[in-house]
Image (cartoon, helix red, strand yellow):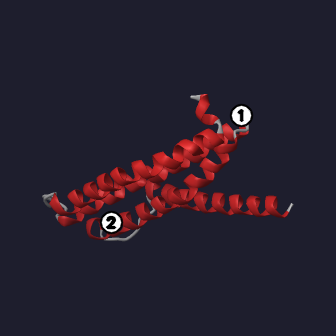
């Protein structure tokens, strides 16, 4: 496994593997979204509003997975000074923030007909809003550190 820790070897392998995995991944993702939005019958209590959960729940998981990736990659960078770890952490930040924002938006859209309000100060909702702010802070600090390293 440490053989892939070499940046040149990893990037050489990723160059041909990424396009090969991109097409099946996109087909599976769009197929699953289409099935969830178009083929699933309405819920007995929530009706058609239940369909948004096929976007909301995966985006919540991906938003949390992005932050977990940042934490693990940052730990690897601090402990082992691995050059790819910092790149992986910064690469996970933007998609993680996007999925967190999608989760908050779809949750509000779902909450309006279900709860009668766009937002409640529930612990789960508030913690995801804080997670979005943490992403924004991480992105700002990472960008400032890159600008400082380029200037110095």
Outermost residue toward the right? Answer: 152
Observer-nearest residue: 74 or 146?
A: 146
Residue beneath disc 1: 80
Residue beneath disc 2: 111
* Mark 1 → mark 2, Cα distance in angstroms: 44 Å
Observer-nearest residue: 29 or 115?
A: 29
Q: Are marks 1 and 2 in contact (CB under 8 Å)?
A: no
Question: Is residue 115 left or right of 99 when viewed as pictured?
Answer: left
- Position of 105 relative to 8 (above/below): below
- Position of 99 relative to 9 (above/below): below
Write the residue at 26% across / 56% down. 31
Write the residue at 23% across / 65% down. 49
Q: Secondary structure at mark 2?
A: helix
- Badge 1, how many Cα within 10 Å: few under 14, some, many 20+? few
**Dividing the image into 4 quarters, which one contains the C terminus?**
bottom right
Which quadrant of the structure image shows residue 37? Answer: bottom left
In the rendered image, residue 63, in percent from the top left (x then y), is placed at 47, 54
**Dividing the image into 4 quarters, which one contains the N terminus?**
top right
In the rendered image, residue 130, in percent from the top left (x then y), is placed at 55, 58
| Mark drawn on residue 61 | none
Observer-nearest residue: 17 or 120?
A: 17
In the rendered image, residue 71, in percent from the top left (x then y), is placed at 60, 44
Observer-nearest residue: 55 or 24?
A: 24
In the rendered image, residue 126, in percent from the top left (x then y), is placed at 49, 59
Label 1 or label 2, whichever comes before in sequence order? 1
């Amino acid at each position: 496994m440490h053989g892939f820790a070499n940046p040149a070897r990893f990037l050489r392998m990723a160059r041909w593997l990424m396009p090969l995995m991109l097409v099946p991944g996109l087909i599976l993702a769009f197929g699953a979204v289409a099935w969830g939005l178009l083929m699933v019958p309405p819920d007995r209590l929530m009706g058609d509003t239940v369909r948004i959960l096929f976007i909301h729940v995966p985006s919540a998981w991906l938003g949390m997975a992005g932050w977990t990736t940042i934490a693990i990659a940052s730990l690897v960078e601090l402990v082992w000074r691995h050059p790819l770890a910092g790149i992986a952490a910064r690469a996970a930040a933007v998609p993680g923030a996007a999925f967190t924002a999608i989760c908050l938006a779809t949750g509000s859209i779902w909450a309006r007909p279900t709860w009668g309000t766009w937002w409640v100060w529930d612990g789960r909702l508030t913690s995801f809003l804080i997670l979005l702010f943490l992403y924004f802070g991480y992105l700002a600090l990472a960008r400032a550190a890159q600008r400082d390293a380029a200037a110095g």
